[in-house]
Image: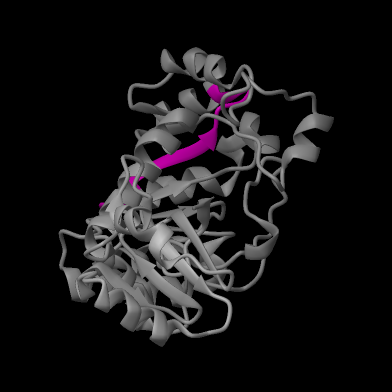
Amino acid sequence: MVLFITGICPKDCFYCPVSDERRADITYANERKVICDRDVLDEALQMDALGTGITGGEPLIRKEKVVHYIRLLKERFGSQHHIHLYTSMTPDRDTLQELAEAGLDEIRFHPPVNIWDKLEETGYANSIRHANDLGMKTGIEIPSVKGAEVIGIFANNLGCFLNLNELEFSDTNSDAMKKLGYGLADDMSNAVAGSKEYALEAVNKCDRIHFCSSSYKDAVQLRKRLLRIAENTARSFDEIGEEGTIYYGHIECVNNDQEAVYEELKKIEVPVDMMEMTSNGIDISWWILEDIAEYIRKPDRKLCIIERYPFEEGLIVEKIPL
């Protein structure tokens, strides 16, 4: 599960992909807005989360909230629920000890690009040493851009791992990236041209190094999360697609007569477990809707097949009119 603590951050990284909507002091568990502790626990249960990644913004701006959620998750799911934290700050030993005692398993530091060539002179070196001493798995996580090999040497000297993420264009960073001369690697993804090559340069500088490609994030990480959620939340008539989206039919009732439509469907022997009344119509198995479309079609009804993400009010990927 991705626990987004806050969208506030003191840094101004040109590649930051956080959406404008989330650049506020607001918390999300995956795509669910968090109002209370129950929201966090329900989201973790919904996807059978084996662990949690805490991110932002800068999560440690809300340190008390971070500590609270670490304890909440560990108390509910046990020590085997792995929790890692992503931060661009340089917390002191007392802060790191508080996080470790709460149950934080792993911390990943994110130093800004403009100080990569002088990291030994910054607080990152001490923070990494303290985190190592306190028994946390410790590493550095950065985008794969020019200079990544320098971070590889720094990580190796401190005995921590290095995670490199293929740089990507997003709605919020594209203008800044274009001004700096970055371009797309191809027309099939958001990956930046040359990012993967910088990772290859860093490989020989660090013993413990991982590279996460743009395609892996989309094809594996996101897909697996969607599938886990879909498998736990799909209704009896929802069909789960290969990418983790769900498919179902929908009858939109323009005159809000869904109760009458529901009874009509029962009369033509549509099983009640194959449909559900909603605020604006009826959700129904897509293949059943295809079979009966000609029998129930009326001017005040809109029939379609919907593909959407398996979240509450999830993004609709496609709507096919019947």
Please give the range of residues in magenta.
132-148
Q: Position of residue 259 (x, y in %)?
A: 40, 87
Residue for point 51% across, 13% down: 201
Q: Position of residue 211 (x, y in %)?
A: 42, 27
Along the viewing direction, whichever of 40 and 226 lies nearer the viewer: 226
Residue for point 49% across, 61% down: 303
Left or right for 258, reference 46: right
Residue 105: tell me if it is visible. Answer: no
The quadrant of the image that shows the N terminus is bottom left
Q: Position of residue 298 (x, y in %)?
A: 52, 69
* 110, above or below 185, in the image: below
Residue closest to the far front: 295
Left or right for 121, reference 262: right
Determine if the magenta segment contains residue 139.
yes
Total marks drawn? 0
* 251, above or below 193, in the image: below
Residue 111: tell me if it is visible. Answer: yes
Along the viewing direction, whichever of 287 and 165 lies nearer the viewer: 287
Q: Position of residue 152 (x, y in %)?
A: 47, 25
Left or right for 68, reference 300: left
* 116, above or below 129, in the image: above
Along the viewing direction, whichever of 222 and 168 lies nearer the viewer: 222
Residue for point 48% across, 46% down: 109
Colour mapping used in the image? one colour
Name the quadrant containing residue 219. Answer: top left
* 113, above or below 1, in the image: above
Determine if the magenta segment contains residue 133.
yes
